[in-house]
Image: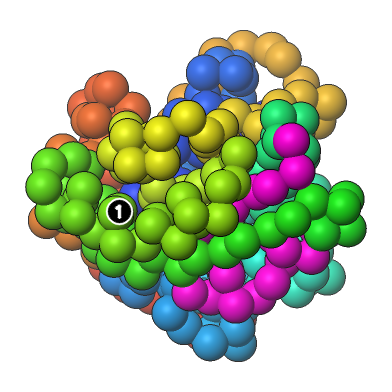
Amino acid sequence: MKIGVFDSGVGGLTVLKALRENFPEVDLFYIGDTARVPYGNRSPQTVIRYSIECATFLVEKGVDILVVACNTASSYALEALRVKFALPVIGVVEPGVREALKVTKGKVGVIGTLATVRSGTYQRLLRREGVEVFSKACPLFVPLVEEGIFKGNIVKAVAEMYLKDLKKQGIDTLILGCTHYPLLKDVIQEVMGEVNIVDSSLATAHQLEHLIIKEGEGETALYFTDESQNLYKLIKILLGNNLKPVILQEDICHGKS
Ligand code: DGL
């Protein structure tokens, strides 16, 4: 069984890691669109187009399930992907919301890219359940992670700047609404103090449980649309191995989207 996973860059590797740990028997194909990261400040139309291109690449690899390991793409492109491809398409937003609802006492914060926060997807799903929601876009977090900077004074200062209002609101749960953010979790937790931090990667893996056929031993193939400076270091940190990625030399979908 083959699962295709995509993100704008390395952030989706947090989801890939959870999938690998939970389903050792599936083949995992990952594409990180490092040539065009970040998606989080693009228009909805562009996010949809890039998402269809990444998904087309994975579908051509013969995947049985598509995991959209990007909150920005999950917020805007799920519908378009489900219409275009006849296979299960799983996003990261709903699993994150479900996880937050399990632990919250009623006040949830959501942090994500500008596009994710603007889409209002998290806010809508949470408010429907009677939860009070506060959100904040944190656009500097993604470049920090892509640069391999996960802690230290700069990350702390940026986190304090973005999170101070959420802290004042007295939220009890914070959803990391971007798959890059789990890499900054320690600093975010330190700044926020005693709040539940929800990372949807594990919840997303659990959502696939009933779709997986468990037989054999799976392999992992990593593709990126550009060789970013810290790619190898980040793969090592995130996946704990020296898996060699393939850097694609041409457009991912040859104009087929
Ligand atoms: N990791 C992605 C997300 O979950 C996208 C970050 C970006 O490209 O801006 O939204």
Please tell me which residue lies in front, 221 or 144. Answer: 144
Which amino acid type is shown beneath numbered disc 1?
Answer: Ala
Q: Quadrant of residue 8?
A: bottom left
User: Residue at the spot x=22%, y=30% of the render?
Assistant: 236
Question: Which quadrant of the rendered structure holds the C terminus?
Answer: bottom right
Q: Position of residue 140 (x, y in %)?
A: 29, 66
Query: What is the magenta range?
Result: 105-125
Please tell me which residue lies in front, 160 or 40. Answer: 160
Q: Can you see residue 147?
A: yes
Q: How many marks?
A: 1
Q: Quadrant of residue 96?
A: top right
Left or right of 203 on screen, residue 244: left
User: Residue at the spot x=32%, y=34% of the render?
Assistant: 190
Please tell me which residue lies in front, 255 or 90. Answer: 90
Mark 1 crowd level (few <14, some 14–19, many ≥20, 10 Å Cα): many
Q: Can you see residue 201?
A: no
User: Residue at the spot x=76%, y=24% of the render?
Assistant: 209
Reading the image, the residue beneath label 1 is 159
| Membership of 253 in magenta stretch | no
Q: Is residue 151 above or below residue 25?
A: below
Question: Which quadrant of the rendered structure holds the N terminus?
Answer: top right
User: Residue at the spot x=72%, y=63% of the render?
Assistant: 123
Left or right of 147 on screen, residue 129: right
Q: Is residue 23 above or below residue 133?
A: above
Task: For mark 1, give the secondary structure.
Answer: helix
Q: Position of residue 187 (x, y in %)?
A: 29, 39
Left or right of 218 on screen, residue 80: right
Q: Is residue 198 above or below residue 176?
A: above
Left or right of 254 on screen, residue 127: right
